[in-house]
Image (cartoon, rainbow, N blue to C red):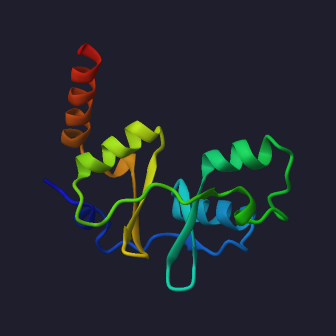
Amino acid sequence: MRTMSDIVRNREPATLPASATVRDACRCMRDRRIGAVLVTEGDHRLLGIFTGRDAVHRVLAEGKSPARTKLAEVMTRDPDTMPPGRTAIEALRLMEDGRYRHVPIVDGDTVVGIVSRFDFSGIELDRLDEETGLWERI
């Protein structure tokens, strides 16, 4: 069974400071072909997460300027996280329960990575679907 350490190994998470703009974050996501950036300070201490959904719901739909709006204003603060030793299915369960697609992987106070629903294999997704089906039938 894969752990979060296995999935995030050799990957540098996209991070930006809270003072970065939404435009900066969107360009970073576009250039790296990812759906979220982690908002950090200092030695990779997690402050929040900013996703493509946040850009649509909290910036564009509200008529805010991506060039002037800081991530601190529109990020999701203190998101749910997982330590690196947890299993893939645990991360998938957390995403399913929280109805989101990204989970930061944090070791103590330090960001070590991020996982997306798209990082998981068919076997892991099949297991989650099987578990979800069981709970729906109970």
Is 29 left, or right, of 3 in this rendering?
A: right
Give the image location of residue 58, x and y in percent.
73, 47
Q: Which residue lies at the image location 53% right of the left edge and 64% below the top edge?
A: 32
Give the image location of residue 137, x and y in percent.
24, 14
Residue sitting at the far bottom: 43
In the displayed structure, 64 sits above or below 32; it is above
Give the image location of residue 113, x and y in percent.
39, 68
Q: Which residue lies at the image location 29% right of the left edge and 18% below the top edge?
A: 136
Is 94 left, or right, of 134 in this rendering?
A: right
Question: Which residue occupies the foreground of this view, 69 or 134?
Answer: 134
Question: Which residue occupies the foreground of this view, 135 or 27?
Answer: 135
Quadrant location of the C terminus in the rendered image: top left
Is 137 left, or right, of 107 in this rendering?
A: left
Count all numbered tags in the image, as a single digit: 0
Give the image location of residue 38, x and y in percent.
54, 66
| Res 93 quadrant in image | top left
Q: Which residue lies at the image location 71% right of the left edge and 56% below the top edge?
A: 74
Question: Which residue occupies the foreground of this view, 13 or 45?
Answer: 45
In the displayed structure, 25 sits above or below 40; it is above
Residue sitting at the far top: 137
